[in-house]
Amino acid sequence: MTGIETYALTPFISLTMLIPLAGAVLLALVPGRHGAAHRGLAFVVSVLAFACSLSVWVNFDPARAGFQLVEDRAWLPFGARYTVGVDGISLLLFMLTTFLTPLAILGAFSAIRKRAKEFYIAMLLLEVAMLGTLVAADMLLFYLFWEFMLIPMYLIIGVWGGERRVYAAVKFFLFTFLGSVLMLVGIIWMHLKAGGGSFALVDFLKLDLGFREQAWLFAAFGLAFAIKVPMFPFHTWLPDAHVEAPTAGSVILAGVLLKMGTYGFIRFAIPLFPDAAGAFAVPVMVLAVVGIVYGSLCSFAQGDVKKLVAYSSVAHLGFVMLGMFALTQEAVEGAILQMVNHGISTGALFMLVGVLYERRHTRAIDAYGGIARVMKVYAALLVIVTLSSIGLPGTNGFVGEFLILAGTFREALSGGGAFRAIGLALGIAAATGVVLGAVYMLTMVRKVLFGPIVHEENRALKDVSFREFAVLGALVVMVFWIGVYPSFFLSRTTASVRATLDAYKGRMVEQRTALLRGVDARAEDARAAPSPWRVAAQEVAR
C-alpha cells in the first residue's frame, strides 16, 4: 500500500456514513406506533446512502494504488485524527455494504413486527459502523468503528432472534470482544513505538519492527481478525449467531460483518507485519484448508437448512483466507472478489431460507420436499443462487474460486522442495472443497424442491411476493454480472493489490539480503578467529 493518493473535494465518504446516522436519529423521533413509517423511512434512508456511495465509485481512479477521496481532520489529542479514504482493497466491500443494507431492510418488512423502530435504528447504526471500519485510515478510529459494530448486531440477535437468542448474542459478543482487546494493546504499542504522536496507518507502516515484535503483534491482530472471519477453530460462535439471528441480521452478518476479519488481514496484518505474515503464511493456509473441508462436512451433516448455510460460510471464507496468504496477484484479487461473491450468494441464501421460514415456521430440511410444484419462481431463484454458491462457470462464485486456486498453485509451483509439496497439497485439498460444496448444496436443493409433496402444508405455500422477488432479483443480477464481466470489478482492485504485494515482497528481499549478509559476516568472523583447538594445542606446547 502506498499511502495517500488524493484528497476529497467533496466529502462523499462522510456523507455516505452521515445519511444512515441521520436516518437513525430521525427514526428515533418518529412515534413508536407507526410501524409502516419506520419501515419506509429506514428503506429510503438506506437507498439514499447507496446512491451517495455511487459517487465514491464514480470518482475512484482505478489506476491509483493508495487511499483516495481522503478526508483528514483533527479528532482527539495525542495524534488521533478523523482520517477516512478508500482504495482498491476497501472499495468493493464499501459498495457491498451500501448495496446489501437496503435489501436486508426491505426483506425484513414482513418478518419484523415487534419493536420495529428499534430494529431499523440498529440496522442503520450497524451500516455506519461497518462503513467506518472499511474506510478508517487512523488506527484508533478503526478500532472505534470495529468495536461499535458489536453493539447493534448484539441487539439484533438478542432482541429479534430465535428461542436461544440471548445465548447466541452473548457468545457472539464475548468471542469478538475478547479477541479485539489484544488488538487494542497492539495499537497502543505501535502508537508508543511511533513516538506517541500518531495513530495514522501510514505512519505505522513506516515503523521498523523486529521479527519478535512483529510476531507478537501479528498474533494480537490476527486473533481478532481470525475470530471475526471466523477461521477454524475460532468458528464456534457463528452457527449459533446465524441460526438465532433474524433473516436480515443473518444477511448482514454473512454478507458484510464476517468480511471485516478477512479485510483486516489484507489491510493491516500483512502490510504492518510482513515478516511475521511470511513466517506464518503456511500455518494460516493449513487452517484455511481445514476450515474448507471441515465446514463442508459439517454442512452436509445438517438437518437445519439455515445451519447448513452457516457452516458453508466457514468453508467459503476458508477459500478467502487461502487466497489472502498465497500472496500472489491472482489469489489476493480473487480473495477480495470472493468476499463480495460470498456476501451476495450467501446473503441470497439466507433470504431464501427466510422466505420459507415465514411461511412454514420451520427450517428443517425434512419438512419440505416437492415445493417446486407450487413455488416455481422460488425454485428457480434457489437453483440459481445455489449454482453461484458452488461456483458454476458463468456465475460470480466461479471467478473468485478459480483465481484463488490458480494463484495458490502458481505460488506452489514457483517454490521448491518441501514448500512446493505443501503448496500443491493445500491447493488440491482446497479444490476438493469445491466438490464437497456441490454435494451438500445440491443435496439440500433436491430434498427441499423436488420429489413428492409429503407434507400437506406444502401444497398451499405461496410463491415469492413482488417485494421478495425485487430483493432476490437484485442479488441474482449481481450473480451474473460478476460472473460474466468480472473485470468491471477486478479493475478497481489491481493497482492496490499490486502495491501491497510489491511492498511485502520488497520487505522479504530486504530480510533475505540481511540474513545472507549476517551469515557471510559470521563466516568471515569464524575464519578470522583462531581455532579453539589450535589455542589449546599452543597452551600445551608452552
Image (cartoon, grey):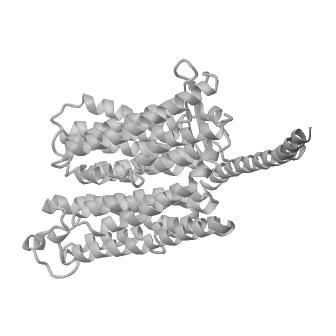
Give the percent coordinates (x, y) of residue 311. 33, 60
Q: Is 449 placed left or right of 425 in the picture?
A: left
Residue for point 32% across, 58% down: 310
Give the percent coordinates (x, y) of residue 381. 32, 69
Residue for point 19% across, 31% down: 31
- Foreground residue among 205 and 220: 220
- Foreground residue among 388 and 45: 388
Residue 37 visible (yes or no): no
Give the percent coordinates (x, y) of residue 66. 65, 43
Q: How many marks?
A: 0
> Which residue in the rendered view is the most extreme toward the top?
77
- In the displayed structure, 450 sits above or below 533; it is below
Q: Quadrant of the C terminus?
A: top right
Residue 423 visible (yes or no): yes
Find residue 217 and report its image quarter: top right
Find residue 158 and report its image quarter: top left
Residue for point 15% across, 82% down: 452
> Which residue in the rendered view is the most extreme toward the left?
456
Q: Is 236 placed left or right of 522 in the picture?
A: left
Q: Is 537 placed left or right of 311 in the picture?
A: right
Q: Is 119 placed left or right of 480 in the picture?
A: left
> Which residue in the rendered view is the most extreme toward the right?
542
Q: Quadrant of the N terminus?
A: top right
- Foreground residue among 528 and 212: 528
Residue for point 55% across, 24% down: 80
Give the percent coordinates (x, y) of residue 99. 41, 51
